[in-house]
Amino acid sequence: MIEVKGLTKYFGATHAVEDLTFTVAPGQVTGFLGPNGAGKSTTMRMILGLDKPTSGVALIQGRPYAELTHPLRTVGALLDARWVHPNRSARAHLQWMAASSGIPKARVDEVLRLVGLTDVAGKSAGGFSLGMSQRLGLAGALLGDPPVLLFDEPVNGLDPEGILWIRRFMQRLAGEGRTVLVSSHLLSEMAQTADQLVVIGRGRLISVATVQEFVGRSSESAVRVRSPELDRLRGLLTERGVVFREDPGATGAALLVTGMPAEEIGGFCADNRIVLYELAPQHGSLEEAFMKLTGGDVEYHGSGMDDVMGGAL
Ligand SMILES: Nc1ncnc2c1ncn2[C@@H]1O[C@H](COP(=O)(O)OP(=O)(O)OP(=O)(O)O)[C@@H](O)[C@H]1O
């Protein structure tokens, strides 16, 4: 379990993280979502004791990182996968990590197997592809078999196969009852990976919800209705004061009805003896929901320095 309470970090005039409060529960993947510069990395660094909060606390299994008796056995993290000694083999790198934390040598081969690097364990990590480096980073995070795991943008730059592998791996770790917090600015990615979403923008908390709740709450939900009697239906809906519009995406004529759930539309049409060909609830994409919610909270991306300073000050 991770508990973040009133977490705040200022870098001079930049309010990187502002009064963040949320909890990350075990047994599920929690997506930490926000546009570039929203403060995700800074928050993760504070949870891991790498940055000192201006105020507030971050607790792992009830304690600040600095007070953990066995840090590597409590929390594993993948922040920058390229952080390995280029001339060291994957196995030597992990053995060095294990030795410095009192973890038995046998665990190294176990984690190499878990991430599928056994065959290249003797090769120098400097020659690894990004995907292999990510796996090595994961192996390092898992050395102490920790109940809590943090991954900062783990799929950045990976090919589709690598993305799928990481996604499944994180879900498996959560399935084992671990607490998994994974950051991303890729909304579509989070929708497929996470159970729960913590969404931030410009350092502030925007939403804590399941993916479905997040989308449902923040995007328009409409129902597509196809019928051979659309003209009569248009008239009846107008009479009743129900909002609808023509569906531009449909093949053939269809209406998009908002503000009336599918069940009610079905009943309404039955009462009025209107034949239905289709009654399909439309769900907004995560992308739409995210843009809507973080629209005013994206860091300034102007071309000149003035814009950057304008955003920071
Ligand atoms: N060491 C630092 N010194 C000054 N400003 C910093 C420092 N680290 C981060 N910032 C600023 O804090 C804000 C949050 O940055 P952070 O890297 O945490 O965001 P992020 O959500 O992880 O974004 P990204 O996905 O681009 O890494 C940004 O405005 C960034 O420029």
Image (cartoon, helix red, strand yellow):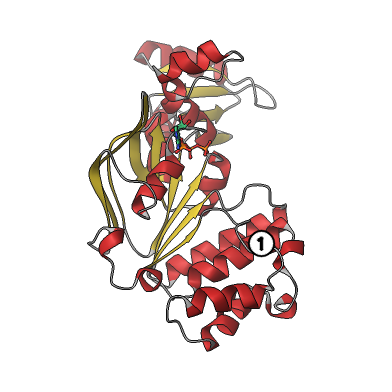
Nearest the camera: 25 or 313?
313
The quarter holding residue 188 reads top right
What residue is drawn where x is 60% and y is 58%? 83
Going by the image, does 231 lie left or right of 238?
A: right
User: How many dots with numbers?
Assistant: 1
Disc 1 element: helix
Residue 252 spot, x, y in % from top left: 69, 24
Considering only vertical position in the picture, is 181 above or below 261? Answer: below
Question: Which residue is identified by label 1?
Answer: 133
Q: Horizontal and vertical percent for residue 26?
A: 34, 63
Q: Amino acid at mark 1?
A: Ser
Q: Residue 148 location, x and y as percent?
A: 38, 65
Q: Please identify the quadrant where the C terminus is shown.
A: top left
Does the beta carbon of the residue at mark 1 sit less than 8 Å from ligand 1?
no
Q: Quadrant of the image for the N terminus?
A: bottom left
Would residue 24 be visible to someone looking at this image?
yes
User: Relative to the observer, which residue lies in front, 4 or 295?
Assistant: 4
Name the residue nearer the viewer: 64 or 298: 64
Rendering coords of residue 249 (x, y %): 65, 25
Q: Residue at x 49, y 71 (%)?
A: 142
- Going by the image, does 300 lie left or right of 92? left
Residue 236 visible to an observer of this rendering:
no
Q: Is residue 297 left or right of residue 306?
A: left
Q: Hey, which quadrant is residue 12 in on the image?
A: top left
Query: Which quarter of the picture shows residue 163?
Result: bottom right
Within 10 angstroms of label 1, few (less than 14), some, or many (20 or more) residues? many
Residue that appears at 64% across and 58% down: 164
